Image: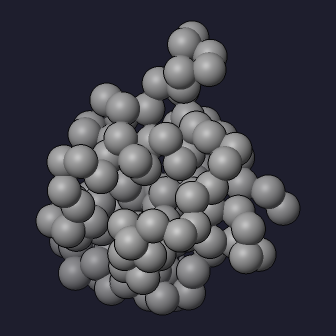
C-alpha cells in the first residue's frame, strides 16, 4: 500500500465514531480517480458526508445545532435532540459532552448561525473536544 498519499485532515470528520469512519472511507474510495487514495478523494468524501446530513436537516435545525455548540447547557430531553442523536447529527461523548458532527459544521447554513451571542467577536466553529 505504498501508493497511499494521504495526510489526515486537521479535524477528525468521523467524530471518533467507527461507523462514520467507515462511511468516509467508502466515500473516499468511490471518489478515487487513479490508483492512489489522495487528499482530493478524502475532501470529496467529506463533502459527500456533509451533503448526506444536509438532506435530513431542516432549516430550523441549524440555529439549534449552533446553539448547542456555543452553549455549556446541553439539552437532552427534546424530541429534536433525540432525532439528532439517533441520526448522528449530534455526537455524544462520555454521556455528557455533545457536539454537532464536524461534517455539519462545514455547511454554510450552519456557519451562518454560529456566532456566539455571549461573545460576539468569537464563533463556535473552533471549539475543541475534551480528551
The x, y position of residue 16, in whole percent, is 62, 74
Q: Nearer the viewer, residue 114 or 47?
A: 114
Residue 44 seen from this side: no
Identify the image quadrant of residue 130: bottom right
What residue is shown at x 70% (from left), y 63% (from top)? 97
Q: In this rendering, is residue 45 above or below 99?
A: below
Identify the image quadrant of residue 49: bottom left
The x, y position of residue 103, in whole percent, is 39, 58
The image's colouring method is one colour
Q: In this rendering, is residue 14 above or below 117?
A: below
Residue 59 seen from this side: yes
What residue is shown at x 73% (from left), y 76% (from top)? 95
- Quadrant containing the C terminus in the rendered view: bottom right
**Which residue is situated farthest in the top direction here?**
121
The x, y position of residue 88, in whole percent, is 43, 75
The x, y position of residue 102, in whole percent, is 47, 56
Q: In this rendering, is residue 69 above or below 129?
A: above
Q: With 43 as the anchor, is 22 left or right in this view?
A: right
Q: In this rendering, is residue 51 above or below 11?
A: below
Q: Nearer the viewer, residue 34 or 51?
A: 51
Q: With 118 as the anchor, is 101 left or right in this view?
A: left
What residue is shown at x 62% (from left), y 55% (from top)? 74
Q: Nearer the viewer, residue 53 or 25?
A: 53
Amino acid at each position: 500500500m505504498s501508493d497511499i498519499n494521504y495526510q489526515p485532515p486537521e479535524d477528525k470528520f468521523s467524530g471518533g465514531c467507527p461507523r462514520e469512519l467507515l462511511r468516509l472511507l467508502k466515500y473516499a474510495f468511490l471518489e478515487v480517480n487513479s490508483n492512489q487514495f489522495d487528499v482530493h478523494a478524502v475532501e470529496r468524501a467529506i463533502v459527500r458526508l456533509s451533503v448526506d446530513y444536509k438532506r435530513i436537516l431542516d432549516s430550523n435545525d441549524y440555529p439549534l445545532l449552533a446553539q448547542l455548540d456555543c452553549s455549556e447547557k446541553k439539552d437532552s430531553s427534546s424530541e429534536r435532540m433525540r432525532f439528532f442523536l439517533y441520526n448522528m447529527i449530534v455526537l455524544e461523548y462520555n454521556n455528557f459532552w455533545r457536539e454537532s458532527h464536524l461534517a455539519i459544521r462545514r455547511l454554510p447554513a450552519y456557519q451562518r448561525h454560529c456566532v456566539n451571542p455571549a461573545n460576539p467577536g468569537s464563533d463556535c466553529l473552533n471549539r475543541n473536544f475534551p480528551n
